[in-house]
Image (cartoon, helix red, strand yellow):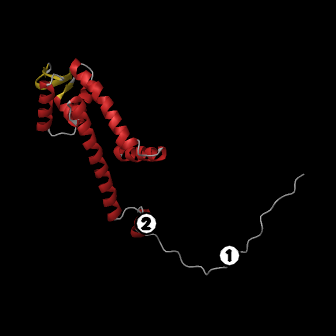
Amino acid sequence: MSPQVTAPATPAAPATPATPATPATPATTAAAATPAHADGYSCARAWVALTAAHARIADRLTSALAESCGLSINGFEILLRLGSAPPPGLRLGDLHSAVRLTQPSLSRAVARLGRSGWLTRAGAPDDGRGVLVSITPAGRDVLRRAAGVHAQTIREFLLDPLTPAELDLLDRALSRISES
């Protein structure tokens, strides 16, 4: 039988006089619940870092897509949405809610992509005012090329500089923000 090991005795803490508990008020409860990073400067620093990272990656992506495929980021986003849409395509209004452009900007972008032969526009059969937009075979080809360029650029400028732990944290943080 092995001998029992016990921890050495620690001296008792000196007795302190009892103080009456301070009742919780909305102000003290809110102060305790406020995260330590909620001051204005840390919020501003986080915002500056986020917008600077986005601008840097968006600039690199803009250049890479334009040089390799003749596409803008907005053109890529439009083709990406249309590439996964079931036939006969998407109504222009549905495309507008999926792509963050104003209606006039979306109409101009769709017209440019149409002139390039990458998408078609047609009247919606059930609505004389509606417009259906669909990707063409040439649009699918350019989307395939652009998807590779997009993946390489995102990997190079967003993912590769981070450690696996940082990637996991970034994924969890951005997912929480986008889902709230």
Q: Residue furthest front?
A: 67
> Looking at the picture, which amino acid does disc 1 mark?
Ala
Residue at 25% x, 34% y is 65
Q: Secondary structure at mark 1?
A: loop
Q: For the residues marked 2 and 1, what is the alpha-carbon distance in whole angstroms?
A: 29 Å
Residue 45's image quarter?
bottom left
Q: Is residue 48 left or right of residue 96?
A: right
Q: Position of residue 135 (x, y in %)?
A: 21, 22
Query: What label does residue 47 carry, if any?
Result: none
**Classed neighbour count for the residue bearing mark 1: other residues with Cα under 10 Å, few (<14), some (14–19), many (≥20):** few
Residue 115's image quarter?
top left
Q: Position of residue 5 (x, y in %)?
A: 82, 60
Q: Position of residue 81 (x, y in %)?
A: 26, 29
Q: Residue furthest bottom?
A: 17
Residue at 44% x, 44% y is 167
In front: mark 2 or mark 1? Answer: 1
Q: Secondary structure at mark 2?
A: helix
**Classed neighbour count for the residue bearing mark 2: other residues with Cα under 10 Å, few (<14), some (14–19), many (≥20):** few
Residue at 45% x, 47% y is 166
Using the image as rendered, state which of residue 90 and residue 22 is in the foreground: 90
- Marks counted in the figure total 2
Query: What label does residue 29 carry, if any?
Result: 2
Q: Is residue 50 left or right of residue 111?
A: right
Observer able to see residue 149:
yes
> Looking at the picture, which amino acid does disc 2 mark?
Thr
Observer able to see residue 88:
no
Q: Residue furthest left?
A: 128
Q: Which residue is tagged 1?
A: 13
Residue 172's image quarter?
top left
